Image: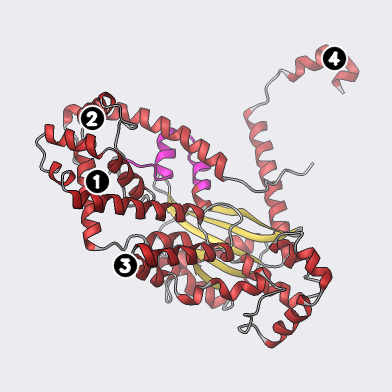
Amino acid sequence: MTRAMHGEKISNTLLTIPLSNDTVGRRIQDIANDIKDQLIDRVRKSGRFSLQIDECTDVSGDAQLLAFVRYSYEGKMHEDMLFCSSMEGTCTGRDIFNKLSSNIQKEGLRWESCVSVCTDGAGAMQGARKGLRACVLEVAPHVKFLHCMIYREALAGRCLEPELRDVLQTSVKIVNFIKSRPLQSRLFATLCHEMGSDHEALLFHTEVRWLSHGKVLTRLFELREEVRIFLSDCSSPLADYLTDPKWVASLAYLASILDKLNSLNLSLQGPNTNVLTLSDKVTGFKRKLERWAVSLLESFNKYFPDDDTPEKYDWICQPFTASTAHHLSSELQDALLDLSSDRTLQTAFSACTLEEFWLSVATEYAALSKAATDTYLLEVGNHLYKILFVSICLQGASSVSQTLDIPQETQIHPPREEDEAERALEAQHREADEAAQTLVLLNATSSGEVLAPAG
């Protein structure tokens, strides 16, 4: 209107006037509300959904309850954040249920439409008497409770043989000896530079950061000769371990095993995962453990029992050739025989994804499609909350590093007073670098459809 009434010059001048903080904040809130309304509308139209729940403490010490929802929309499966709500007071199973149930009811959703809930293995979540599981089953007995596969893999990978655990503990002591003082770290970096090493620093190990085991041991093995020379110059008895061929061989073996565990853990993460693909990956890894480490195989069998084998999902992956569907009801088996005899559907099956295929046959084979899509709705991975916490805490480098379990200087000796100032300065530079790496990781891992504001 200004351009029509007063011309281009005055119109461009008005465009340079910045909006007030209240106006910007109001527009952001309106966009957020519109996106949320679209999400709730999608979930309602899908008819069924599954939840992914996690409760964590942020950098300010506040407990946050995160909920993600998986649903079908326009022939595809989608995952989006449902809400992030602060927990006041205690965080028992009943408290978590009350907060979760109130948010679900506020959005007009029903527990009757919930297919499954995926959580970690904490007692407040999985408790059979007072946990979230018990509270949910009181109001929705049909809901399936699943233990996140990523957490189960991390727990199974901790069960090492006593000899290998001693190797891990000794390796941590070696790393702490060098990394516990800034002066030691600088001298070691100088030695590595003079020797033309590929790396000039060791990595820290922390129990709460699952992938640190393999990275720490791999780096230590690569720099074993430099570490041995440095420890010998410092007259440390730890140098004797690096001169023992048996101990070095155990270090190489353990580093290789943990590297494989890291690769499995990373493969279980990411968008668009489902129980079918993750079960196949775990089953393949268990078969390889028969050759690598029997003790780890026993641990994996404990957390991934045989009743979780992917063969029972063959009728979903290969509906036209599968022969193992005896666990289905008689009605579903008859429907599967009818579907497998349909040559037109067989042609369509090869031209789309499994999820799209089973959603497309919902009209003709409603019961069979529901059974298949309910399987795809099962949440088995709990990785999305980490991405969300990055978004919450991207206000400073220190917030990012603490939120994403970026390795801090844990399991080390207390610094001397004269080293504290220098140590703090180095920590600031390190956190800034890690924050930049975290941003790259966030951009690489957060994929999927992004809801756009209407209009």
Quadrant in the picture for residue 335: bottom right
Res. 328 visible in picture: yes
The residue that mark 3 highlights is 295
Callout in the foreground (4, 1): 1
Label 4 and label 3: CA atoms lie apart by: 77 Å
Image: 24 above or below 75: above
**Closer-to-camera residue (363/213):** 213
Q: Is residue 197 magenta?
A: no
Callout in the foreground (4, 3): 3
Q: Are marks 4 and 3 in contact (CB under 8 Å)?
A: no
Q: Earlier in the sequence, mark 4 or mark 1?
A: 4
Q: Residue at x 16, y 47 (%)?
A: 241
The residue that mark 4 highlights is 8
Label 3 and label 1: CA atoms lie apart by: 26 Å
Image: 326 above or below 155: below
Image: 263 above or below 153: above
Residue type pointed to by label 1: Gln
The residue that mark 1 highlights is 411
Residue type pointed to by label 2: Phe
Element assignment for label 4? helix
Q: Earlier in the sequence, mark 4 or mark 3?
A: 4
Label 4 and label 2: CA atoms lie apart by: 65 Å
Residue type pointed to by label 3: Ser
Element assignment for label 2? helix
Q: Residue furthest top?
A: 9
Residue type pointed to by label 4: Glu
Magenta stretch in the rendered image: 387-408
**Closer-to-camera residue (126/198):** 198
Label 2 and label 1: CA atoms lie apart by: 19 Å
Q: Residue at x 55, y 52 (%)?
A: 270
Element assignment for label 3? helix
The image quadrant where one finds the C terminus is: top right
